[in-house]
Structures are given as C-alpha cells and as structure tokens.
Amino acid sequence: MSKYDIVIIGSGLGGLQCASILGRKGYKVLVLERQTQPGGCMQSYHRHGEDLDTGMHYVGGLGEGNCLHSTFKYLGLTELPWQLLDPEGFDRVTIGDRTFKYAQGHEAFVETLAREFPNERKGLENYAHTMREVGNHLFDAIKPRDEVDFFTTSLFASSTYEYLHETFHDELLINALCGSSLKMELAKDTLPLYNFAQANNSFVQGSYRLKGDGNLIVNKLLDNIRSFGGELACNAEVEELIEKDGKLVAARCKNGEIYEGDFFISNAHPAVTCDLVKESTKLKKVYRNRIARLENTYGMYTVSLILKPGQLKYFNWNQYIYKQPNVWDYYKEEGPVSGILISCRVPESGEDARILDILTPLPWDRIERWENTRIGHRGEDYVALKERMADECIAMAERFIPGLHNMVEARYSTTPLTYRDYTLTPNGSAYGVRKDYHNPMMTLLSAKTPIPNLYLTGQSLTLHGLLGVTMTSLFTVAEIIGKEEAWKITQTV
Ligand SMILES: Cc1cc2nc3c(=O)[nH]c(=O)nc-3n(C[C@H](O)[C@H](O)[C@H](O)COP(=O)(O)OP(=O)(O)OC[C@H]3O[C@@H](n4cnc5c(N)ncnc54)[C@H](O)[C@@H]3O)c2cc1C
C-alpha cells in the first residue's frame, strides 16, 4: 500500500492543475484516472492519422494582463503554441442571412456591434462594463482580505435573460450577443449573469486556439507533475473512498490497489464523488441529497471532419450559424439541427484546413433510450442517429462553406453518451452542474465537503470551461496551501 500527501481522483483539467500546483508546493501527489488516457474532456483521440479534440476548441483571457495569464504562466501553459483568433471577429454569429462579428478588446467589441445597432450603444457600453468588472473579480474568493464582494455575489443571483432584456431593446442584438453561447448552456430560467459575463469577458479580452490538440495541455501539466515527483496511475478507477474516525484515509480502486493519503481531491462529478464515500459519519443524508438533486447542463454532439487536402482555406475564427433568430430555445425543439458552432484546427503547415469540428447541443431525452448501452455496442439506430446528425450539421455548415459535403475524407462523431462513458459525468453533461440564479447558494458548490480532508474541484463547482476550471482549481488548492499562497499564483508576472 502506498501513502501520499494528496490523492486526486480524476485527471481532468481540474485534477491535473491541482496536482501541478500542489506538487510544486512540495506535496507528494498521486492522480488516479479510470481511463487508459489522462485529460478527461481535454483529451484527444486518434483516428485516420489525426488527433481529434473532445472538449477543447478555444480559450479566452490568456494575453498579458488578462484574467488567466498569470495562472497559465505559473502552470507553464503560456509556453504552448497558442494562436490568437482574428481580432476583428474572433466569433462570428450568423442568424438567418446576417452575420455579426465579436471584436477583441472591450472598446472594439462595442464599436463593431454599435455599427450594426447604433441605437444600442449605451447598452453595449453597460454590458462591456459589466464584463470588465466581473473579470476583475475572477479570483476574489481567495483574495486575502475579509470583505465580501457584493458586485460578484449579486451577479450570481441575477438572470442573464432579464439583464439582457433590461439593457437592450433590439431582440436581434440580444440573440447576436448570445449566439456564441454554445460554449455554455443558454437557459432562460436559470443562467446567472455571473457565468455569462465572466465567460464572455475572457473571450473578449482575447481568444486563442491551440496549434495542435488538447493533449498539449494535458502533457504539459503531466510534465510539471512528474518534474515535482508526482505520479499518475491510469486504469485506476476509484470505487471507494474509505473513511476512518471522521476523515478519509484511503482510495480503493477497482483493480484492487489501495492508496492512502492525508488529503483527497475529487475531480469526478460531485454526485459521483458522494457515491464513492460508501460509509461515513460526516457525509450526512442532507448533503448527499442536495448533491444528488442538482441538475446538469446539456451534453453536446460533435462531428469531426477530416478534409481532403487543398479544399478549404483555414479560417481564424469560430463560426456560429442559426437557422432562426431564437438562439435561446432552438435546441429544445425536435427536428433537424438548427444551430451549430464550426471550429477549424490551425493547420500544422500551409494554409489548408485539415480538421473541422461542428458542435450542436444534444439534450439527454433524445438519447436516453440508449442509456444502458456501452461504447461500440449501442446498435444500428444509434449509429443512424449519429450519421443523420452529421449530415444535418454539414448541411447547416454549407451555408458558410458551400460544397463542404464533398470535401470530407472521413468523419467521426461523439454524443453525450460517449462523454458519460468516458468521464462518468451524469447524462454526459458538457458543462457540469447547472447554476441557477434563483438559488445560487444551492447550485454553487464549495471546494470543501463535510469530510474535513476531502475537497472537490472541476467544472461543476462554480464555472465551466478552461476559465472556470482554472479558477476553481485555485479555490481548491487554497483550502490546502492557504489563500495567500494561492492568490500569489494568480499574480505571477
Ligand atoms: C464538446 C465540448 C466542447 C467544449 N469546448 C470547450 C472550449 O472550446 N473551451 C473551453 O474552455 N471549454 C470547453 N469545454 C468544457 C471543458 O472541456 C470542461 O469544462 C473541462 O474540460 C472540464 O474539466 P474537469 O476538470 O471538470 O473534468 P473532466 O474533464 O470532467 O474530467 C474528470 C475526470 O475524472 C475521471 N474520473 C471520474 N470518476 C472517476 C473515478 N471514480 N476514478 C478515477 N477517475 C475518475 C474521468 O475519467 C475524467 O478523466 C467543452 C466541453 C465539451 C463537452
């Protein structure tokens, strides 16, 4: 039996970031991953001679002085080959026959949209101000001071939908501003303004794509972890977290291995984590029920297209396309795909695009009938659904890339069932626990749990994506190294 200072369950972005920071601070760290490969939603998979991405397309806030820069620098992630997306239009939202560009930098963002909607300039300035403010407070929860930040707290309890309708008059502008939101779940009744503004702020500060696949991030973090003496064990699914005298003492894996630790951090979904603690004097029914009752955001369908050479020039932005103007509800309607994101991989050399990913939300009720099946054994109907959705995604994308259908050499698709089976996230949710502005206290989760040496990390706590997970990793490690030390990481120059 091996003993560690810190045992981390799950090697998603959050698990690897916590391991990297704690290893550097001198702790003996072990990461346990159930899959054969680390990374969770950051990992890529190899098909047709190419590495295809799962949950990494672009990230904001990496430039100097931007919200993620210091922390990414501390983690060595600024050294990766990042490509700045088109400053004049990093996101482009096509609704019907009109296309709206998001420019980088708050002033340029306002100017570009104010040209299209001159009567809405004041509202756009107000929105840019809200984004900036919320971005300035990203890491406030670990700021070593006592005051409560009422600005941020109030945004958790405010509705995105209501804010937009109070700030703007033109419904088309509201849809244009929300049309890049396949990167979060647009839900009228629940989405807090905090999550909408925080995510959008980072992308407006500066948006980047990797020149390569998501495994570059995973491998960089693993290099850090190993250089500080940390370890990763794959094929190591934790099946029980063992409690003794009110504290966790060990993690027992399905393969029979037992790992002892002083502290435990779970990067698995919070509901999965609760199930791992089979017997406890600390994890009471009320906490378990609260976590079990939390709803999850929708999952995504992705089709990755490998293109024939010389067919399409690389385009340096994200293209969102909607058939009809209502970007808030389209995914709830049965019927052909009617809203997509197209993301183009930066070519290794030359100007030709080789890999395109097309994404669209896929609510659980449309795939629930296969919930008791496993990868590769879901039957012909499921394969037919995936193929039909791929055709529909390509047909939608042809509004922007005429003839795309004939450019495809090979295509591979994933659904929320794929994500569920790889990461164990309930219903293959893309962005974890759904946050609800009516009830921020219940839907925002603390890194602390009722067990004093068990902490949570990952996208389900506060905010998803590389931004949200990085923020949460800092909150989690702060529980072990203290706020002062964690705060310093966010101020690295
Ligand atoms: C289709 C899609 C596209 C996305 N695109 C973007 C994007 O462009 N930009 C962006 O910022 N974000 C994007 N995201 C979101 C981003 O990928 C996630 O927010 C982030 O990767 C989640 O990281 P995490 O640390 O919460 O853990 P996860 O990635 O969920 O990893 C959890 C890990 O824990 C492991 N695990 C679970 N249970 C156990 C157990 N019992 N024992 C051992 N291991 C266990 C899992 O196998 C997994 O490896 C996208 C997500 C999806 C689904």
Image (spheres, helix red, strand yellow):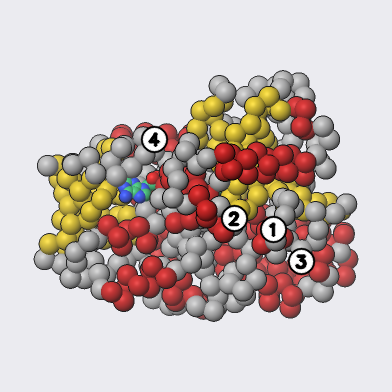
Residue 241 screen position, x and y as percent = 22, 55
Q: Which numbered marker is on residue 37?
A: 4
Please state, as top left, top right, bottom left or bottom right, where the N terminus lies in the image: top left
Q: Quadrant of residue 35?
A: top left
- Residue at point 37%, 62% (across, down): 271
Counting residues from the start of the chain, the first of labels 3 and 1 encountered is 3
Asked whether the beta carbons under mark 4 and mark 1 sit within 8 Å of each other, the answer is no
The amino acid beneath tag 4 is Gln
The amino acid beneath tag 3 is Ile
- Residue at point 87%, 70% (across, down): 119
Q: Which residue is mark 1?
A: 334
The amino acid beneath tag 1 is Glu
The amino acid beneath tag 2 is Arg
- Residue at point 54%, 27% (across, down): 47
Asked whether the beta carbons under mark 1 and mark 2 sit within 8 Å of each other, the answer is yes
Depth-wise, is mark 3 or mark 4 nearer the camera? 4
Residue 369 screen position, x and y as percent = 52, 53
Q: Which numbered marker is on residue 85?
A: none
Depth-wise, is mark 2 or mark 4 nearer the camera? 2
Counting residues from the start of the chain, the first of labels 4 and 1 encountered is 4
Left or right, residue 487 beside residue 23: right
Q: Which residue is mark 2?
A: 366
